[in-house]
Image: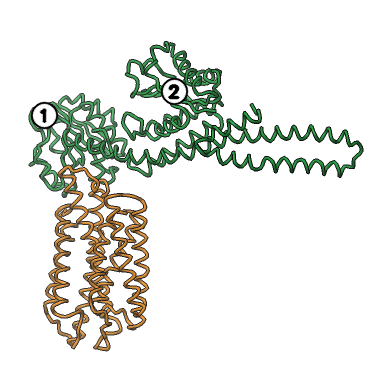
Chain colours: A green, B orange
Amino acid sequence: MNIVVVGLSHKTAPVEIREKVSFPSEKMPDYLHDLLTRKGVTEGVILSTCNRVEVIAITSHIQDGIEELKNYIADANGISIDQLGNHLYSHTSEDAIKHVFRVASSLDSMVVGEPQILGQMKDAYQDALEHNVTGIILNKLFSKAFSVAKRVRTETNIASSAVSISYAAVELAKKIFGSLEDKRVMLIGAGEMCELAARHFINNGINEILVTNRTHARAEKLAHEFGGRALLFENVYLDLDEVDIILSSTGSPIPIINAAQVSEALHKRRNRPMFFIDIAVPRDIDPAINKLDNAYLYDIDDLQGVVESNKKEREKEAAAAEKIIEAEIGQFHAWLRSLDVTPTIVSLRKKFDEVRMLEVQKLLLRLGDLSENDKKTIESATTAMINKILHMPVSNLKKMADTTEGDLYIDSARKLFDLD
Amino acid sequence: MNLGLTLFRFATTFYLLGTFAYAIYLFFPKKWAYRTASLSLLTGFVLHTGSFTSRISIAGFPPVTNLHDALSFMAWAVIGIYLVILIWYKIRIIGAFISPLALVLMLSAYSLPKEIAPIVVPYLKTFWLPAHIMLVFIGNGFLAVAFAVAIMYMIQEYQLKTKKIGKLYRALPSLDVLDNMNQKALLWGFPLLTLGVISGAIVVQQMHEGLLVWGKREIWTLMIWLLYAVLLHGRIYSGWRGRKASTISIISFIILLVTFFGINLTVGEGFRFH
């Protein structure tokens, strides 16, 4: 039984290839069913996301297994294996375990530490489980991968800091205001990044969002979209003291909010802090505002700086995460090996017992009339003999199974006693 | 060596260990560092409480009438408040800033004479003097916590203003939490200080048969009380907060410490009634 992973990801395949390979979830039952009809495949899970498609399977042979899975991916997507060729990666045994753990822990992701991959993996496993295409090994592998991912998440800071501009803004706001629940956000102007940040703020439970734009209709449209309130562009200064967070991204060539206005607003709101996020270039908000007490201003470069420092932090944390994974692989691999040794021992015992029973039967025939008691004595004496003979080899085999030569010992035992 | 002082030494050792572990936790936020720190401080606190119980049973009253025990008592209050904050608000990092304060107080107490000062005027023995001193020092304990939190605020505010997003930025709580914590500590500390001042006036009156005597100690005490009164008033009624409130909180506490040591080490320790 071998764990084999074959697939492609953002690291090995360009988007032109990735977009050609996918396993849509609505057809997953068929895919899983097909996978199991492949030669030597006994268990399988298919993970299909926009950055990664891979098949994790248990196969009876390693090399054949890899080829079988490669062909399977090509066939299922109706492309030739030559086209996929170099873009496919494959991992086996210990390497495969490590790969699955790293993917679940988001160490192999495009943005290291991003949380979605774990959920996608859980879904993929759930699908396979429901369609009965997983067995003892993959069940254990995935539940272990999920617990490793959890350990990585709780024991390192890999996912604790924002690596996108819009999310960095939300995190900064949290460091200023603590909870965002009773906070009001004002969105000035429009633009993709600004709207994304606004969405993040809404998801983090802000109280209300006000939207304003030179074109009032546009403001009303956005306000409707966000479930907020549209504000006349001319009234921005009037309501400035009522908002805690100001997100700005207009095409204005000159600043639209100056320090004097903010100073007045701060006074009106009894110095409760204000947070300005200026995504516009040229800037919308007078940089002098950052010098005012209780006002905090971050422009696009500042946010970029935060993101960079967070990325560095994540990379450092990733090193710690790799250590955790390394430790967990050992444990899992030991379990996998013991799984191999168990059936070997069972067949070994069976083999000996068959010989014993045959000989006992012959003996009983030859001896003729014997009391039930005598028959029992013969039975138990021969059983004890076999147990004693097998005791050392079995316990040694179990012991050796945990070492790197485990495979060799198990293989030898199978050959010596002709167990296959 | 009597039990009270032995326990005091052990408590100091544990506070030292806790402070050290917290310093590690500040820069390497590992679980083991936090566990070591908080457990050390808790153990120190329990031993410290034992030390006081023993001192009280020897003296027959809380022996806070000498400088050693007064400082030790303040350290005890500071750690006690830290433990309450930890349990109540679960802000772990706060210990990194509070424990050094307690440690400094303990080490100062450590270096001072430890004989229990007898209360010469017999009727004071019963209630007012120890009560006065304990109120003042629990109050001071809260003001010390306000000071520590204000320092945390200043660091975090500096990082947010200058956009230095480093380890400390991640470790420290939000400005809002710190500002609230400062206000809460003041709201506890100031009334206790006020009660302490009033009970102190009663003690002095009893000694001087109805006369209020204005010595150095009384004048400075009133000044510090006024400083905190202004700060709290500004916070509640004039929208003082953040950087301004933290700065005043820090300066006030430094004046309090300087005055306290200045007066008690030059004028003579504690209340000496002759």
The answer to whether residue B195 of the structure is visible from this angle is no
Position of residue A118 relative to residue B86, above or below, is: above
Q: Chain of mark 2?
A: A
Q: Which residue lies under the disc numbered 1? A: A282
Amino acid on which disc 2 is placed: Val
The residue nearer to you, when weighing A385 against A163, is A385
Residue displayed at 12% across by 37% down:
A237
Label 1 Cα crowd, 10 Å radius (few <14 / some 14-19 / many 20+): some
In the rendered image, the vertical position of residue B115 relative to residue B155, given as above or below: below
Could you tell me how far apart the alpha carbons at marks 2 and 1 are, in whole angstroms?
Answer: 48 Å
Instruction: Name the subunit of mark 1.
Output: A
Q: Quadrant of residue B35?
A: bottom left
What is the x, y in percent for residue B78? 28, 65
- Determine if residue B272 is in view: yes
Residue indicated by mark 2: A6
- The quarter in which the C terminus of chain A is drawn is top right
Q: Quadrant of the N terminus of chain A?
A: top right
Label 2 Cα neighbours within 10 Å, binned few <14 / some 14-19 / many ≥20: many
- Viewer-side residue, B58 vs B90: B58
Which amino acid, mark 1? Pro
**Residue A96 falls left or right of residue B24:** right
| Dot placed on the residue nearer the N-terminal end, 2 or 1 | 2
Residue B170 in picture, x, y percent from top left: 26, 46
Q: Helix, strand or loop at disc 1? A: loop
> Same chain for the residues at labels 2 and 1, yes or no?
yes
Q: Residue at x 21, y 85 (%)?
A: B206
Residue at far front of view? A416
| Residue A21 x/y as whole percent | 40, 17
Q: Looking at this view, is B44 or A236 the one in front?
A: B44
Instruction: Looking at this view, name the residue that lies furthest to the right.
Output: A369
